[in-house]
Structure formats: structure tokens, C-alpha cells
Image: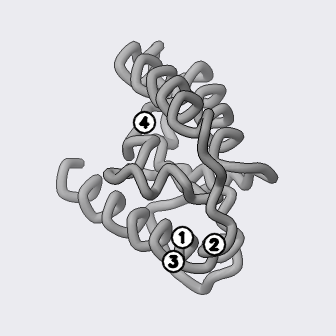
Amino acid sequence: MKYIVVTNNNSLIESEKDFSDVIDYVFVDGNFLDVLVKVRDLIHMGHKLISHPLGASIRIMFSPVRSILLSDEKYDADILSMEVIESSIDKYKATMENRNIDFRNKDDYEFIDIELLKSALDEARMFK
């Protein structure tokens, strides 16, 4: 299976990392919410979520960067992916309503984002 990565992580785009299963990177010039919205748009075009749009901890929600893994193939409407991304957008907005994005630790968040992407790819390969 081949994958698409939707990201706003400049370090990922600029890195020498070889994710051989990734055939396309969709770079979003914006913040975490903008990445979620782009993912939603791609899901409505037929792609499926492979990695969860939100991180495993609340602290990751404060990150200015996010990379999300999608299927390269297009399918009929995937209701589960649609529900997950819509719920994720709502949860992100509610969480960040009274919080600020943590730009001070951006370099650390970029590194963590790449490691989370590696982990998501490894897990996706196991369940092909």
C-alpha cells in the first residue's frame, strides 16, 4: 500500500528521511487546524485515514506542526474517516479555544512529529 502525508512540518519536507511507502507529500502552508481541514478535504475526495489526526497526548495539541497519513488509493466514501476527522476538528477547536500554540518549542515538536509519522508508517505496514 502507498500513502500520502499531509503536513505543515518543514523539517519533514526538508529532511533526507526515506519513507519509501509515501508517494506524495501535501504541504500545508498553515497551522495544525489547516492540516486537519486539508485532510478532511482529501477524505471527502475518497482517501482514508491511516493515522489518527490528533496526537496521543493533550500536549501535542499545542504543537504548531502535524503530519497525518492517508491512503493513496481512493475509495467510496469512508464514513469512519469522515467521522474521525470531523470529531478531531471539533476537539481541536474546543481545546485550543483558550490555549495558545506553543511556537517556543517548535523544533522539538517537529522532531516528535517525524517520530510519530515513522511509528504510524511502521504500524500501517504491519496491517497491510
Question: Is there a contact, CB below 8 Å, between mark 1 and mark 4?
Answer: no
Image quadrant where residue 119 sits: bottom left
Report the Cα–Cα distance between label 1 and label 4.
Answer: 22 Å
What mark, if any, has residue 109 been given in the picture? 1
Give the amino acid at mark 1: Tyr
Q: For label 3, count other residues whose C-alpha is less than 10 Å away and answer few (under 14), some (14-19) or many (20+).
A: some
Q: Name the residue under label 3.
A: 111
Q: For label 2, count other residues whose C-alpha is less than 10 Å away and answer few (under 14), some (14-19) or many (20+).
A: some
Q: Earlier in the sequence, mark 3 or mark 4?
A: 4
Question: Is there a contact, CB below 8 Å, between mark 2 and mark 1?
Answer: yes
**Callout 2: SS:** helix
Nearest the eye: 14 or 127: 14
**Callout 1: SS:** helix
- Horizontally, residue 40 falls left or right of residue 70, namely right
Give the amino acid at mark 4: Leu
Report the Cα–Cα distance between label 2 and label 1.
Answer: 5 Å
Q: Earlier in the sequence, mark 2 or mark 4?
A: 4
Report the Cα–Cα distance between label 2 and label 3.
Answer: 9 Å
**Callout 4: SS:** loop
Q: Mark 4 points at which residue?
A: 49
What mark, if any, has residue 54 been given in the picture? none
Farthest left residue in view: 126
